[in-house]
Image (spheres, helix red, strand yellow):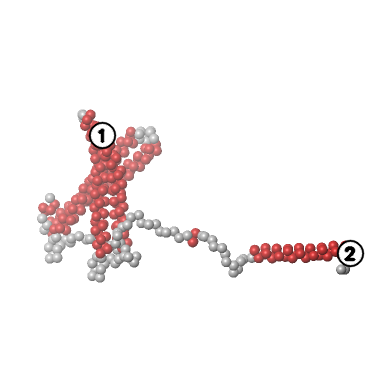
């Protein structure tokens, strides 16, 4: 073995350590540089973004028709080859007629209930009634007051169901049944045509007349409550402001009902004249 001086041994050890340190440093720098460069060709770990989330469409709140769609998901044809209404359109017409009748009946029931409450209040305010009679009126008034919100809710739901059916038919290109014609196939006046128009017109008159009474009562009632709360000079200003807003809305509805009543009455007179010219007996209007 060759003898080396202590100084030489120390120098060799220093060079060895320096080389090892340089190699380690170079390896560390190359790793850091590779980490900073874009990973071309490397597969990235999957990340979930908003584009990857599929939001299902909202389900319909109510099925409009059990046969509204075919089994393959396509819409049924509106007309048959001969031009007649398809089975789907005929089914839709039947549903619309029933829904329209339900909506009309529910509206009339709710409005008549409100009119009855007003009549009971007026009856209760009359003098000269026995205590037993007044207690009966109070009981009826309390029951009617509890029933009215439910009746209004039913009327609102019936109207919404009708609107959904009508909107669906509009999208599908459906039309409601036209009804009888003014003249029969032989060219003679069709009495049933005039009877159907008379039924619709008298129904419009009854509805408009009922709503005139209804909204007139509302305007009177709200005006009275405004006066009891001090009007514009006193009382709860926010409450009075809300009452005035409700009164304005009721007044607008009252004017619309009066206009509808006038229109329906004019239509009735026009129908009578049209029937007279067609030779229809005036007995149908009695």
The residue positioned 26% from the left and 57% from the top of the image is 96
The residue positioned 51% from the left and 60% from the top of the image is 49
x, y percent for residue 111: 26, 44
Q: Nearer the viewer, residue 20 or 259?
A: 20
Q: Is residue 3 left or right of residue 64?
A: right
Number of numbered callouts drawn:
2
Tag 2–tag 1 contact (CB < 8 Å): no
Query: Which class describes the residues within 10 Å of circle 1: few (<14), some (14-19), or many (20+)?
Result: some
- In the displayed orientation, state which residue is furthest to the front: 1
Residue 236 seen in the current view:
yes
Which quadrant of the view contains residue 33?
Answer: bottom right
The residue positioned 47% from the left and 60% from the top of the image is 53
- Quadrant containing the N terminus in the rendered view: bottom right
Judged from the image, the secondary structure of the residue bearing numbered disc 1 is helix
Q: Upstream in the sequence, badge 2 or badge 1?
A: 2
Q: Which residue is mark 2?
A: 5
x, y percent for residue 102: 25, 51
Q: Which residue is mark 1?
A: 138
Q: Is residue 219 left or right of residue 237?
A: left
Residue 220 seen in the current view:
no
Query: Which class describes the residues within 10 Å of circle 2: few (<14), some (14-19), or many (20+)?
Result: few
Which quadrant of the view contains residue 100?
Answer: bottom left
| Image vertical order of residue 185 relative to residue 206, above or below | below
x, y percent for residue 122: 24, 35
Disc 2 and disc 1: Cα gap in Å?
A: 125 Å
x, y percent for residue 72: 34, 66
| Image vertical order of residue 230 relative to residue 252, above or below | above
């Amino acid at each position: 073995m060759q003898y080396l001086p202590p100084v030489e041994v120390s120098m060799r050890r220093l060079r060895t350590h320096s080389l090892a340190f340089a190699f380690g440093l170079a390896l560390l720098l190359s790793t850091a540089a590779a980490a900073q460069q874009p990973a071309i060709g490397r597969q990235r770990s999957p990340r979930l973004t908003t584009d990857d989330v599929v939001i299902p469409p909202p389900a319909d709140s109510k099925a409009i028709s059990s046969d509204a769609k075919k089994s393959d998901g396509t819409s049924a044809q509106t007309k048959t080859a001969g031009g007649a209404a398809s089975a789907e359109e005929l089914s839709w017409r039947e549903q619309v007629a029933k829904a329209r009748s339900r909506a009309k009946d529910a509206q009339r029931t709710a409005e008549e209930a409100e009119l009855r409450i007003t009549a009971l209040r007026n009856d209760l305010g009359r003098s000269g009634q026995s205590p037993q009679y007044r207690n009966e009126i109070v009981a009826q008034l309390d029951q009617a007051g509890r029933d009215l919100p439910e009746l209004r809710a039913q009327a609102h739901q019936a109207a919404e169901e009708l609107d959904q059916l009508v909107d669906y038919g509009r999208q599908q290109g459906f039309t409601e049944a036209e009804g009888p014609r003014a003249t029969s196939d032989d060219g003679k006046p069709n009495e049933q045509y005039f009877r159907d128009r008379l039924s619709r017109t008298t129904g419009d008159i009854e509805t408009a007349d009922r709503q005139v009474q209804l909204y007139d009562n509302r305007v009177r009632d709200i005006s009275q409550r405004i006066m009891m709360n001090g009007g514009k000079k006193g009382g709860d200003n926010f409450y009075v402001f809300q009452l005035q807003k409700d009164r304005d809305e009721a007044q607008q509805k009252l004017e619309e009902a009066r206009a509808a009543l006038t229109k329906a009455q004019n239509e009735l007179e026009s129908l009578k004249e049209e029937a007279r010219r067609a030779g229809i007996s005036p007995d149908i209007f009695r």
